[in-house]
Image (spheres, rainbow, N blue to C red):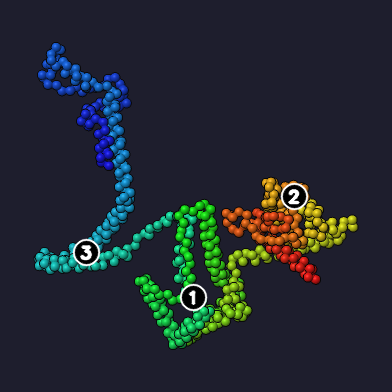
Amino acid sequence: MLRRLDKIRFRGHKRDDFLDLAESPNASDTEGGDEIPLKMPRTSPRDGEELRDPAGPGTLIMAAGVQDFNRTEFDRLNEIKGHLEIALLEKHFLQEELRKLREETNAEMLRQELDRERQRRMELEQKIQEVLKPRAEEQTAQQPPKGQAQANNGADRRSQGLCARVQKWFSERFGEYVEDFRFQPEESAVETDEPLSARRLTENMRRLKRGAKPVTSFVKNLSALSDWYSVYTSAIAFTVYMNAVWHGWAIPMFLFLAILRLSLNYLIARGWRIQWSIVPEVSEAVEPPKEDLTVSEKFQLVLDVAQKAQNLFGKMADILEKIKNLFMWVQPEITQKLYVALWAAFLASCFLPYRLVGLAVGLYAGIKFFLIDFIFKRCPRLRAKYDTPYIIWKSLPTDPQLKERSSAAVSRRLSGHDKLQTASSRSYVSSAPAGLSKDEDTGRFHGTKKGNFHEIFNLTENERPLAVCENGWRCCLINRDRKMPTDYIRNGVLYVTENYLCFESSKSGSSKRNKVIKLVDITDIQKYKVLSVLPGTGMGIAVSTPSTQKPLVFGAMAHRDEAFETILSQYTKITAAAASGSDS
């Protein structure tokens, strides 16, 4: 860096050749004037004689001196400009060097630490002065007479030396520990959030899976003990546990098992191959992370990780919400059982000896874990009737279930109100004029925006939409057998009747654009995902018929699952009726 500055500094003429700034004219706003004071060089007497003699030999020298020193204003400005450029370049490179030094040494943090130490030193000095001030006052108040002071001078010096040594020893030994109890304002560290990255997200999910593996394997082994996966291991564990509880050695037994587990982990960390597990571990193939991923692969990777995270967070949320609802009396009949059990446990702990309470709890836990749970898992009906903790846990609702129940109650109230309105309308229909037939009146309630339902699709009058789809499901029909874009995709509404699947196009009033499919002619029906790159399971239904080479797809359907269940149930009912008719 210094070499670079030297090159820039001496790029032009040398410093000695420049006009001295002290001898240069003063820079001012009138710098461009004609009258510029010039400082003439000093001349010796001999030179003066030569100058006074026009014909003398010094005429040429004088002319050269006058030509050198009578520089124009432009030349002087150029020289000053060169000085300024060199100074600015030096300043720039020095600033760059200073910035690099600041980055390397982190001068700001050092300055803050120095300020803290300085403040700390000032506080310590103030404390020392506060301690020494009353001591000095006591010494001045208790100062003995001069004769006595001279007599006791040696003893005072010895005592002061001893006190100083004791104080020094105490500060060296315990000063650091005393400073640890010093109250300081807590520094809040702001954590920066990392940007979203597909690779980082996948790595974090794998880390979570590896970190939770010991816990999951422990839970699997406990479940295997309760299920008697290995009869000999479960029998030995049951016998040892019951004996330990009976003799009051349950807590020492668990502590000994923890020490044994840590010892085995130490040996495994040292390189020993020790593997003890009731359930055999299945080694999963770990795929090496790919370096170069395409956009679609990254998107699919993020979707997979997001789906796993969604399911994991959903399970955790269900558990936490059930615990919260248990303690918040959401279902009083369930929380009441817990309330009574807690009162019984409290009274038993107050009046019964702890040894008896511990024995009863330990025996019940062993019998419940090894015998009762085994029977309940093998007999689901018995478990659903008599397993109280299982029944309580399954009957506890989550927050989404509570919302569904409240919305269902509201819908039931609304449906009851609608029934009252329909009853009043029926009474109005019965009192209507005789010229209006019943079929004409009911046709008004089963019509579309363009007319009556059976007229639009050329069906019989008894073909009406089912109650679940009276208004139809908005969707788009994708017919991949057609070549034209206008025929390839059509927007409209889908209806389901007892025997037909009806699609009403919304673009044209012609019935040629509508589609009617017999449920009996359907060969296959399944949920369909039109765009595989989008998240989720899709919003389409694919229907295959003998008349089409490729399945017809009803896509962009908001209530896809409801429509699919309705079509599938009606299709199953029609096919079952057709099969029974053919058998008879």
Number of labelled discs? Answer: 3
Q: Nearer the viewer, residue 556 or 489?
A: 489
Measured Cα–Cα span from mark 3 to mark 1: 76 Å
Which numbered marker is on residue 135? 3
In the displayed structure, 159 sits above or below 464; it is below
| Residue 325 picture location, percent across and down | 57, 69
Q: Quadrant of residue 138?
A: bottom left
Measured Cα–Cα span from mark 2 to mark 3: 108 Å
Left or right, 555 with reference to 12? right
Residue at 48% in and 83% down: 232
At label 3, the amino acid type is Arg
Residue at 48% in and 65% down: 285
Q: Is residue 418 visible?
A: no
Left or right, 327 with reference to 18? right
Reading the image, the residue beneath label 1 is: 279
Reading the image, the residue beneath label 2 is: 513
Between disc 2 and disc 3, the foreground one is 2
Q: Say what secondary structure mark 2 lies in.
A: helix
Q: Say what secondary structure mark 3 lies in.
A: helix
Pointer 3 with pointer 1, Cβ within 8 A: no
Quarter of the image that includes the N terminus: top left
